[in-house]
Image (cartoon, helix red, strand yellow):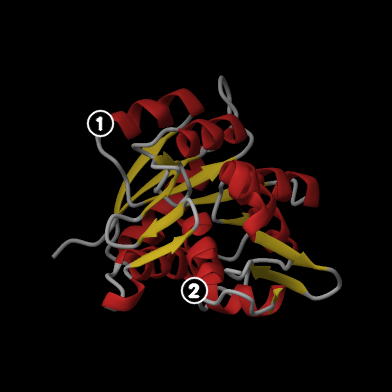
Amino acid sequence: MSKEKILVVDDEKDIIELLQYNLEKEGYRISCAYSGEECLENVKTELPDLILLDLMLPEIDGLDVCKFLKNYPQTSHIPIIMLTAKGEETDIVLGLELGADDYIAKPFKIRELLARVKTVLRRTKINILPLSKEKDMIKFKDLVIDSTKHQVTLKNLPLNLTSTEFNLLKFLASHPGKVFTREQLLDQVWSENSFIVDRAVDVHIRRLRQKLLSASEYIITVRGVGYRFKEEI
């Protein structure tokens, strides 16, 4: 059985060739794009299992590409690893706010990049596995988390959450009233991925709250500790 398909997006030919060679050695199927516009056209043809996305791209930059893909229902589930030459925290946080799953700064070590690719793909597979029956459906007031459909509805209207946002919400809602530190959430929601920084949790919580609208109050910040999901009274 063929491995997952990865779309590599970068305007530097040498980077594309390096990544394609090493990823194909690992058995992945690779397609390439040299601009943001070409990336979006490629995704229309065949949905990849993961996108390695450079931020500094001609025509449409990587952040705009990420924003479009994560806001479009048909592509919001595709994990994205950002490639950035800047390595600045502001770029990383902005990319995470837009829904990216991970990042790696150039120049990078190929073994580290391969490890991140493997981790993100594994985490994505875990996310779509069916849960035990008692956790298939979580209902809290007007909010419903359906693991079998990988869908969240509020007042019977579907919410467009990324895979990470869905799993973060599901984990918190599965343990109402229990406080989790950022480190604990990283361990539970991001699985074995040790590359994500603690601040990523705050970024994803903030983005999740924005999408939850009136249900945003169900996620409570415990100052100086972490987060918990509201208990039914």
Q: Is residue 106 visible?
A: no
Q: CA distance from mark 2 to mark 1?
A: 37 Å
Circle 1 sits in a helix, a strand or a loop, which is it? helix
Q: Which quadrant does the N terminus fall into?
A: bottom left
User: Which is more toward the observer, 47 or 213?
Assistant: 213
Q: Are marks 2 and 1 in contact (CB under 8 Å)?
A: no
Q: Is residue 194 above or below residue 2?
A: below
User: Which is more toward the observer, 185 or 141?
Assistant: 141
**Quarter of the figure with residue 129:** bottom left
Categorize mark 1 by other alpha carbons within 10 Å: few (<14), some (14-19), many (20+): few
The residue under the point 69% across, 50% down is 206
Amino acid at circle 1: Thr
**Quarter of the figure with residue 63:** top right
**Quarter of the figure with residue 229:** bottom right
Categorize mark 2 by other alpha carbons within 10 Å: few (<14), some (14-19), many (20+): some
Mark number, residue 13: none
Between marks 2 and 1 in the image, the one whose residue lies nearer the viewer = 2
Q: Is residue 150 above or below residue 225?
A: above
Q: Where is residue 118 shown, x and y percent of the image? A: 42, 69
Q: Where is residue 60 shown, x and y percent of the image? A: 56, 23
Q: Which residue is mark 1?
A: 45
Circle 2 sits in a helix, a strand or a loop, which is it? loop
Q: Is residue 18 above or below residue 210?
A: below
Mark number, residue 174: 2
Q: Where is residue 222 shown, x and y percent of the image? A: 79, 70
